[in-house]
Amino acid sequence: MPHETTPATELTSHYVSQVASDLDRNVKGQERIAAEIAALQQELAALQHDHAVLVSCASS
């Protein structure tokens, strides 16, 4: 019986390791995307500001 338990234990250990790796990769991906979104939001705000200035100059 212990002979059959070893492969199951090894398989479980492999799955646990894989899940931990997947979770780490997922968190890093979320952090990367969040940083990209923040940069794009800043760029959008700058463009919107420029647009407002240009519209105000054009209507003067």
Image (tube, rainbow, N blue to C red):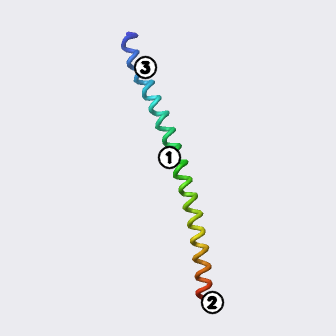
Q: CA distance from mark 2 to mark 3?
A: 76 Å
Write the residue at 49% across / 43% down: 26
Q: Is residue 31 above or below residue 4?
A: below
Residue 7, percent from left and from top: 38, 18
Residues at circles 1 and 2 in contact by the CB criterion of under 8 Å:
no
Residue 49's label in the rendered image is none
Residue drawn at x 51%, y 38% is 24
- Residue 58 in the image: above or below residue 21: below
Q: For this view, does 57 lie left or right of residue 4?
A: right
* Residue found 37% across the figure and 10% down from its top: 1
Sequence-first disc among 2 and 3: 3
Q: What's the CA distance linking mark 1 and mark 2? A: 47 Å
- Nearest to the eye among marks 3 and 1: give it: 1
Up/down of 25 relative to 59, above or below: above
**Mark carried by residue 9:** 3
Give the mark nearer the N terminus: 3 vs 1: 3
Q: Secondary structure at mark 2?
A: loop
Q: Position of residue 45 (x, y in %)?
A: 59, 68
Mark 3 Cα-neighbour bin, 10 Å: few <14, some 14–19, many ≥20: few
**Image position, residue 43 (x, y; %):** 57, 65
Residue 60 has which mark? 2
Q: Which residue is mark 1?
A: 29
Amino acid type, label 3 = Thr
Residue 16 spot, x, y in % from top left? 47, 28
Could you say which quadrant of the image residue 44 lies in? Answer: bottom right
Q: Amino acid at mark 2?
A: Ser
Numbered disc 3: secondary structure:
helix
